[in-house]
Amino acid sequence: MSIVETVEVKSASKQTTDFLSAQHKLVIGGTAALSTTGETFQTFDPALGKVLTSVPHAKQADVDAAVAAAQAAQPVWQRMAPSERAALLLRFADLIERDTAWISEIESLDSGKPKLHIAAVDIPLGVGALRYNAGWCTKLAGETIPVSSPDMHVYTRREPVGVVAAIVPWNFPLCQACFKIAPALAAGCTVILKPAEQTPLSALILGKLALEAGIPPGVLNVLTGEGATTGQALVEHPGVAKISFTGSEEVGKHIARSASKTLKHVSLELGGKNPNIIFADCDVEAAASVAAGAIFFYSGQVCSAGSRLMVDAAVYDRVVDRVVSEAKQLKLGHGLNADTTMGPLISEDQLARVNGFVEQSRKGGIEVAIGGNRGKGDLASGSFYEPTVLCGADDSASVVREEIFGPVLTIQKFNSLDDLVPRANNSNFGLAAGIWTRDISKAHAAAAAIQAGTIWINTYNQFDAAVGWGGFKQSGYGKDNGREGLDKYLQTKTVWVNYGS
């Protein structure tokens, strides 16, 4: 396996190092503030296992202050001319795009993923979400409804739900934040952004850029802190009207239970155990190459990762060989190194979880075709794990059924479409799936039969701000992106007018 020889950071910009050395503050009502308790917590570079900086740990009083600021700002933001709201969102997008170079450095240091991936994928997706939703500001119309009652004019208004708590995951911090901020602000809501404690830094940058863009104080507030304290306080706060959460199935269920006490609106984008299906009649080499990228991108720490590769028995050996060959070409290293193609896992805890699944598979007789170990040599101090391919697992194996969230791929055989579909659907999750075939009838038949929120045919991991994203079953409910992603921040009011004498 080819890996870079060193993970020492030599290319961080002065803007990045200045930011890391600064005292970080919460953004509440347009004001930068320390936590009321003065408490902080550390965030780490997972490639080096070293502390990057410390950020405030928001507690109940800080949550109360942020909710009060968001409530005060919400009527003003809602009444603002839609065209003005749109202009501010576009300005916000421009500023993020302007700062792509150093934001991608911060995000790389905080999350471990390669800077080049962040600049090419994550930030453009986030910017795109802001620009797309800015277009909706001037188009949120109700309707007139003909009714049977005489002399009655009935119409509807689409109004914001109120204060939104946007709780985002550590794998795509800026991108996921924009997926929630953009439609909420376009709808006229105000937002409290709570980033994951593992990757809090880009959220603080977003809070500052929103103010620079001219978005009024209190419209976007940023609270850094742990999920069990800061996040829980937001979920339980009676002044928060909606929770928009992306993260694990376990935490999502907990949020749904907690939010039910105040009957909050809740949307959940949770995990996935996604089948990526290769039929024998496709371009096998191309499909296998993309399949490797579908699992090893960001070290497999992606909810849409194609972690279950299901292959027509006729081409199984060819696919395994190509995927293993692709894995050998990956270069593990620090995200700021230009030749790095795969970074570390987010933490030592995550590495231990991933390795536990692989060790259990080894003991169960599942073949490890490549990988299955943490990084060695210069990589040993970071949370690096080798790209890993497991062959021969049956459908009941934990590596086939559970979301590992690491660079671990299972490859299984199937014999026919009838054999494939029930096995592909035999999962608690239903987020996404890939289908590779030249047979258009087979492609549509499989797409109709597989239970997942998104199906990619002859491609994988395609996203766009105009296209809704969300899953079935325990992958959650509610959509990010597209018109559906905007609708969840709106509620419908019906107005009856008696115009008769």
Image: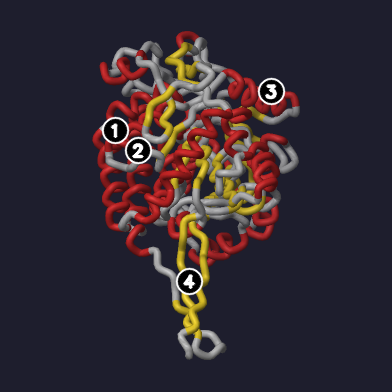
Instruction: Name which residue type carries label 1.
Output: Thr
Please tell me how many numbered marks the rendered image carries: 4
Q: Which residue bears the numbered disc 2?
A: 123
- Marks 1/2 in contact by CB < 8 Å: the verdict is yes
414 relative to 405, above or below: below
Q: Which residue is mark 3?
A: 359
Q: Which of labels 4 and 3 is toward the front?
A: 4
Callout 3: helix, strand or loop?
helix
Query: Along the polypeptide, which appears first: circle 1 or circle 3?
Result: 1
According to the image, label 1 marks what residue? Answer: 100
What residue does disc 4 label?
156
Q: CA distance from mark 1 to mark 4?
A: 41 Å
> For residue 254, which quarter of the picture?
top right
Residue 13, x across and y down, in percent? 27, 18
The amino acid at mark 4 is: Thr
Q: Position of residue 214 (x, y in %)?
A: 28, 41
- Which mark sits nearer the N-terminus, 4 or 2? 2
Cα distance between the residues tagged 1 and 2: 7 Å
Lower sequence index among marks 1 and 2: 1
Q: Nearer the viewer, mark 3 or mark 2?
A: 2
Q: Nearer the viewer, residue 241 or 266?
A: 241
Residue at 37% over, 56% down? 79
User: Mark 1 or mark 4, which has the lower sequence index?
Assistant: 1
